Amino acid sequence: MSKPGSAAKVKISRFDDLFGSPEGQTSADQVQEIPLRELHAFKGHPFKILDDEKMQETVESIRNYGVLMPGIVRRRAEG
């Protein structure tokens, strides 16, 4: 019989509940949902998209569990 951990009592429904939303932050500093088409690669970008078996596993995982680790992005100088 396993004992439930204290994390089982935590209920989080929004990213801001997890990461916080301190007073004085601008909307650009807060957790936001943005369309993927708004993302652009940068010079020396270390990640590549390969349509292979691992990508299909990732797609299936997201389909089943949602996004478990949100991406972190920065605003480009040109917007």
Image (tube, rainbow, N blue to C red):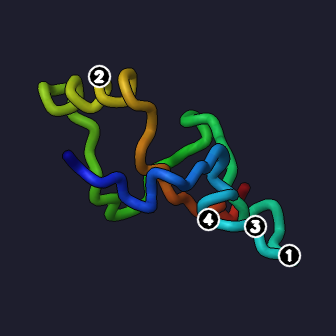
Name which of mark 2 and mark 3 comes first in the sequence. Answer: 3
**Label placed on residue 72:** none
Q: Which residue is mark 4?
A: 19
Foreground: 68 or 72? Answer: 68
Q: Which residue is mark 3?
A: 21
Foreground: 16 or 42? Answer: 16
**In contact (CB < 8 Å): disc 3 and disc 4:** yes
Residue 56 percent coordinates (x, y) = 22, 23
**In contact (CB < 8 Å): disc 4 and disc 1:** no
Amino acid tagged 4: Phe
Residue 69 percent coordinates (x, y) = 42, 50
Q: Is residue 70 placed above or below 35 in the rendered structure?
A: below
Amino acid tagged 2: Glu
**Label placed on residue 23:** 1
CA distance separating discs 4 and 1: 13 Å
From the viewer's perspective, is 72 left or right of 3? right
CA distance separating discs 1 and 2: 38 Å
From the viewer's perspective, is 17 left or right of 37? right
Q: Residue at x 28, y 38 (%)?
A: 49
Q: Is residue 40 placed above or below 59 in the rendered structure?
A: below
User: In terms of secondary structure, where does tag 4 sit?
Assistant: helix
**Label placed on residue 60:** 2
Amino acid tagged 1: Glu
Q: Quadrant of residue 79?
A: bottom right
Q: Quadrant of residue 54?
A: top left
**In contact (CB < 8 Å): disc 1 and disc 2:** no
Q: Residue at x 55, y 55 (%)?
A: 10
Amino acid tagged 3: Ser
**In contact (CB < 8 Å): disc 4 and disc 2:** no
Name which of mark 1 and mark 2 comes first in the sequence. Answer: 1
User: In terms of secondary structure, where does tag 3 sit?
Assistant: loop
Q: Quadrant of residue 76?
A: bottom right
